[in-house]
Image: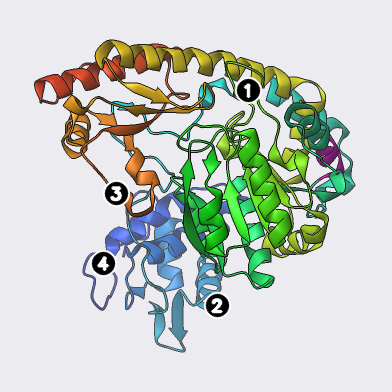
Amino acid sequence: MTSSGTNSPPGPAASEGDGGASAAWELLLPAASAPARRRGRALQSALRDAVRSGRLPAGTRLPASRELAADLGVSRGLVTEAYEQLTAESYLRAGRGAGTWVSGAVRPAARGERDLSPRAPGPEVDFRPGTPDLALFPRSAWAAAHRTVLDRLPHSSLGYPDPRGLPELRVALASLLTRRRGVVADPERLVVCSGVAQATTLLGFVLRERGEAEVGVEDPGSPEHASLFASTGLKTLPLPLDGEGLAVEPLLRSGVRAVVTTPAHQFPTGIAYSSGRRGELLDWARRTSGVIMEDDYDGDFRYDRAPVGALQGLDPEHVVYTGSVSKSLAPGLRLGWLIAPASMTDAIVARKRTMDLGNPSVDQAVLADFIAGGGYDRQLRRCQRAYRERRDALTGALAGHFPGTEVSGISAGLHIIARLPERYGPQDEFLRRATAAGIALRPLSDCTAGGARDSTVRLVLGYAHLAPSVVQHGVRLLAEAVRHGQASRVPAPRAPVVET
């Protein structure tokens, strides 16, 4: 080995199974040049990473501490300390007079990175529903609220929070939901949670503890409910809809005592439950001591009239109300709420405590300030204007490029249901051509039990995340692909940058 310790890496080390181990010593050179006060930790981290990555495989013999120190130009004490620390952590093994070796206790980490966020790369225009326009997030107003909150937040608020949520946020949300959605919102029974997904699992655990084995879900409905309830040990029973909402007779025959509904704007059909059907569901809950979970995921987004108030306001002791800011602000905030009947509140709060000890305090305080200062109402108005324009762009483009298309459901929400004329079928061929043209679509059959298909093309089309020009381009591109039967690719116009 050399003794320069500057730019020349050490020579080959004795190794069992890796003739190229000397290349691994090069990984230590940046650590050797770190500032003196951080050099020891940097050396330990570099050695640890070399073992984890497999660059130093099990059985590799390391140079003596004196030799490695000379090659790296560091003190022998730093190398000795690094060897001792990694031996204590089982990355290395050492024996008196036998040298230091890479142990077999560590398995190299899998190479490569995976992005597990729920989006698929590649499509030129993605009409799949579920995502708002993240460019509409009010960065400036949110940052201002963040600064305000940090300036006044007492130190005590940075400890473990009340599992229900910060009192100021629960009060702000109770006032907001009472005013905008007609909810009976007692701050003492409101639980801040990580979106409707966590609200669903909290309810599932409590229902399971009460002896329930099955929960009714809308069919068609959100595909996520089955997996969320399954994680709590509950099965889901698909229950059919009719033109007024969840059909009552199948619900009565099912024997379930808990059901999930989206009455303000059913996903995915887009209908609003009729007044009569809302009353029938509440009658069922009262007669059976049942529970209705109301997912009010986009109840604020009604474009042709004021939105219908929440079902929970009619009977807060039989309805569990849930919602979130995922559509109005951003899903990445992971902030939502659950308002429970009095008989379930304590059990839900206890489960919330054991699940995560509460949501981040600062984020809760920022949302409370944002609501109290009127920022949330302004954001809702801004989103309503943008999404109404995009819905109009989509329905207009469909009428122009796919004449005869039927758009069902009320003028609300972040998606539509489009039923194309029979001449555009069969659906499988239509979807194949769309994919080849770079258009991502979600058929209605993906949201039904069993995913049954027929020749008719029925699509769940999301539009909130797409600028009107992109919506029009996507429909035009889809029409060209279907008409010509080929993947005609035209560069998509860039969505305009929205200043926030």
Distance from the alpha carbon under mark 2 to that under mark 3:
58 Å
Res 43 seen here: no
For residue 370, which quarter of the picture?
Answer: top right
Distance from the alpha carbon under mark 4 to that under mark 2:
26 Å
Q: Which residue carries the number 3 mark?
A: 452
Instruction: Give coordinates of residue 103: x percent, y percent.
Output: 40, 79
Task: Tell me if label 4 and label 1 are in contact, CB under 8 Å.
Answer: no
Quick one: 320 or 154, which is closer to the camera?
320
Circle 3 Cα neighbour tier, 10 Å, few/some/many (<14 / 14–19 / ≥20): few
Q: Earlier in the sequence, mark 2 or mark 1?
A: 2
Distance from the alpha carbon under mark 2 to that under mark 1:
46 Å
Query: Closer to the camera: disc 4 or disc 3?
Result: 3
Amino acid of disc 1: Arg
Circle 1 Cα neighbour tier, 10 Å, few/some/many (<14 / 14–19 / ≥20): few
Res 388 seen here: yes
Question: Helix, strand, or loop for circle 4?
Answer: loop
Amino acid of disc 3: Ala
Question: Helix, strand, or loop for circle 3?
Answer: loop
Q: What is the magenta range? A: 166-171
Distance from the alpha carbon under mark 4 to that under mark 1:
54 Å
Task: Tell me if label 2 and label 3 are in contact, CB under 8 Å.
Answer: no
Q: Earlier in the sequence, mark 2 or mark 3?
A: 2
Q: Which residue carries the number 2 mark?
A: 88
Residue at 77 percent of width and 37 percent of height? 183
- Magenta span has 378? no
Q: Earlier in the sequence, mark 4 or mark 3?
A: 4
Q: Which residue carries the number 1 mark?
A: 139
Q: Where 190 falls versus 384 (above or below)?
A: below
